[in-house]
Structures are given as structure tokens and as C-alpha cells.
Amino acid sequence: MCMLSTKATCNSHGQDSSYFLGWQEYEKNPYHEVQNTKGIIQMGLAENQLSFDILESWLAKNPDAAGFKRSGESIFAELALFQDYHGLPAFKKALVDFMAEIRGNKVTFDPNHLVLTAGATSANETLIFCLANPGEAVLIPTPYYPGFDRDLKWRTGVEIVPIHCTSSNGFQITETALQEAYQAAQKRNLRVKGVLVTNPSNPLGTTMTRSELNLLLSFVEDKGIHLISDEIYSGTVFSSPSFTSVMEVLKERKCDENSPMWNRVHVVYSLSKDLGLPGFRVGAIYSNDDMVVAAATKMSSFGLISSQTQYLLSAMLSDKKLTKNYISENQKRLKQRQKRLVSGLQKAGISCLKGNAGLFCWVDMRHLLRSNTFEAEMELWKKIVYEVRLNISPGSSCHCTEPGWFRVCFANLSEKTLDLAMHRLKAFVGEYFNVPDTNGRSQTNHSRRRSLTKWVFRLSFDDRSPVPGR
């Protein structure tokens, strides 16, 4: 007899995805500029490490914030004692003001409609708990963040039905794709409770157009369902078109508390990407629905943000000189780093979807596949992880419908490491496209693709010990 629960023994967490397996391989043989120059370079982690110096400089000039003091007097005991799970009012006010500033103050947010959570993972799961029952469904456009299979499904019992988007229009959402996804859910006898989108998109690195947002709002209004807009990358938009929040479009459509849509649009936010603070575990839900706010607030007791974290960040975000400078400078740095990655990819003969946001590029390696299949994509991915020693995320882990696309991150590593990664990739592609035939001539493209089948993988998923010195 099994002594554990079904939840403990089930295999629906998603941990066996190639997205997470790539991380495992990296952790066994991580690259280091001095100690392990032959290791795997982590390009599968969407972290923003480009602007820590700005925050560290502020901390040095404001020691009271990090020292848990107010006007020079210690408030350690005050912060150490139990805090109400509604959160510190000063932090909630500073956070909604920061959200508005990122959106050009075109929309404002009421702190009374904000629920604090331990990161966006908790925020998304909590919203799903509030909006759907086990066995019901949410629609999500592909490709989407692989962690959603864990965040939205594992504990809630809710199903994800993909909205299939394609490269023919830059993976934008269409009316046809929405209707087909809705019909697919109905054929599976799944009641659709909402649509969830990431804007800016992870993994595409693009912002949604106003026409897409209007299409989504019209669709959910027609179906009588909810819309969740995950906007945790809103402050990373570094070039045109600028970011448009779903709340801005809702305002343009003159939706107010008397509109049926007013209570059915919800926003998820976090400081993990915009400020590069995933370790602080700061997330939030914004909703105009009082019942959602009340229920989510009760659920937030299972994943609170520490009072010390809230105090520090309330001081930091309340400094408007800091936030203005940080937002501007961080976006400049992201633009420069993305440009460096794109340039390196181009030198290797690789293109990517034109992006304007995020911490990654959606990279097109279809020409490197031996066949137009996901098996060929996984074959190429293994080669890149084990032989080229770069951890990138295959499109299949993001549920992309087309083989050969990969997410490559650029903001979690130094320029020197990024250049090395591009050098490795260029050498790999050059070797691949110049495999000589028996007469010393370069093979045809078809033959080159067939040559991929001859690759010998020094590591397999049954033996994941890193090759010494690789």
C-alpha cells in the first residue's frame, strides 16, 4: 500500500521537461571564467543581472533601509514580529506607483486591489485557484513559458489548452487561433474559464499589439471568461513599439466598474525581472474583483513576503530619482546586450525573431535541423548542451508548434561570457556547414543535415556525468 498522497507520487510537475533538464546539466558542469572555462554556459536562465550596480549604489547611500532603521533608530523588533498578510501599506503604495511609472503613468493602480505574493509563480497559481476548478481549463498562446505547466496545473488540477500561434505572423494571436483553441477545449469537455497571456512575451521577447489586446478583450467578453495578463517583463521594453498594458486598453474601451469586463481582467506583476530580484520573492496580483482580492489575500498567507523585504523595497521604490534613473538605464543596457547577442548570432549565420523586450531572444535554428521534426530539434539541442556546452531552451519545451526555435537568454551573463558563447556557437555552425565529402568538397545542405545523424553524444540522459574538461 502506498503511504503517500497522489500529489506526492504523480509525475505532473513538469520537472522532466527539457527546460529543467538543461538546468540540471548546467549545474553539474557550470562554466566559470577562471575555475571551469570548459563548462556549460547558462543561457537558459531569464535573470536580469545588468543593473545591480545601480541598486547597490543606492543601498550604500541609504544604509538605514538595509539596516532596518528609521531616522537612525532600529525598527528590527517591529519588523521581526508578526505582520498582517495584507502587507505593509507603505510597500503596497510604492509598488503600485512603480507599476504606474513603468507604464508611463497612463494607468494608475489602487493598492487596495493589490495582493502580495511570494513571486509571480505564487501569483499565477493563486489566480488560477480563484478563477477555475479542477478539470476546467485556461487557454494560453504558444510558445509559452515552460514553468506554466507546473505553476498553473500541478496543484490546481486545471488544464492548459494551447492557442497555436505560428511564425507566419511573428507568433501573434489571431481570431482563428483563439476560436480553434476554445473549440478544442469543448471537444475535450473542458469548461474554459479564461485566457492567460504574458506581455511582454516569454519566450518571444516581444510586446503585444493594441489590436491583439483588443482582440483578446473582445474574445473573453464574448465568451464570458477571464483574462490574466502576466506583465512581469513590462519594465524590460527597450525599443519600439512601447509597452501597452491590458489595463490601458481596458481604459481606452471606457470599461469601468459598471462594465462586465471590469472584474474579469487581472494583472500579475513581480520585481524578479524588472529589478532583477528573483531571490527576494516579490510578486503581486492586481484585480478589480473584490471577491478575487479577498480570496487571494487569504491564500497569500501560504506564501508571504517577509516584512524586512517589504520595508527595504518600500524605501527603494519610494525614491523617484532612483526609479526614474534605474528604468531608463536598465532599458539601455538591455538594448545593448540584446544587440550584442543578435550580432553574434548573425555572425554564426543564425537569425532570430525581432524583439523589443525581455531578457532573451527567440532564435531560429530550423536550418540546422536534419529534418523538420521535434526529434531533430531534441537531437540538435543535446548537441548544443553537451558538445557546444551552452544551455538554451528548445522550442518544444515552450510548446512551440514549429521545430527548430530556441530561447536564448542574454542578461544573466557578462559580455565576455556572451562573446565566448557566440564563439562556440559560430565554431559549431562553421564545422557543421563545412563537413567535407570524400573528395574534399563541402557537402550539400541536404547532406549536411544528414551528417547530424552521425553525431556521437558523449553524454546521454541515462548517464549525465559531465565529460572531464568539456
Image: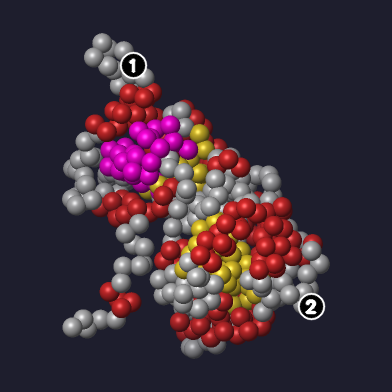
The residue tagged 1 is 442
In the figure, 310 relative to 41: above or below?
Answer: below
The residue tagged 2 is 258
Which of 448 and 273 lies nearest the eye of the viewer?
Answer: 448
Q: Quadrant of residue 2?
A: bottom left
Q: Residue 405's spot in the image, x, y percent? A: 45, 42
Tell me, yes or no, whether the highlighted magenta stretch contains residue 370: yes
Q: Horizontally, is 167 left or right of 19 in the view?
A: right
Kindly identify the amino acid type of the residue bearing the numbered disc 2. Asn
* Residue at the extreme front: 187
Residue drawn at (22%, 39%), measured in percent from left and top? 457
Residue 7 visible in rendering: yes
Residue drawn at (26%, 49%), measured in percent from left and top? 29
Q: Main secondary structure of the magenta part?
A: helix
Q: Are marks 1 and 2 in contact (CB under 8 Å)?
A: no
Which of 193 and 209 lies nearest the eye of the viewer?
Answer: 193
Residue drawn at (43%, 32%), measured in percent from left and top? 367
Q: Horizontally, is 25 left or right of 50 in the view?
A: left
Q: Residue 74's spot in the image, x, y percent? A: 53, 81
Q: Quadrant of residue 41?
A: top left
Q: Residue 357's spot in the image, x, y percent? A: 59, 49
Which of 161 and 114 lies nearest the eye of the viewer?
Answer: 161
Q: Which residues are magenta?
A: 364-393
Q: Horizontally, is 378 left or right of 222 in the view?
A: left
Q: Residue 62's spot in the image, x, y percent? A: 57, 66
In the figure, 402 relative to 176: above or below?
Answer: above
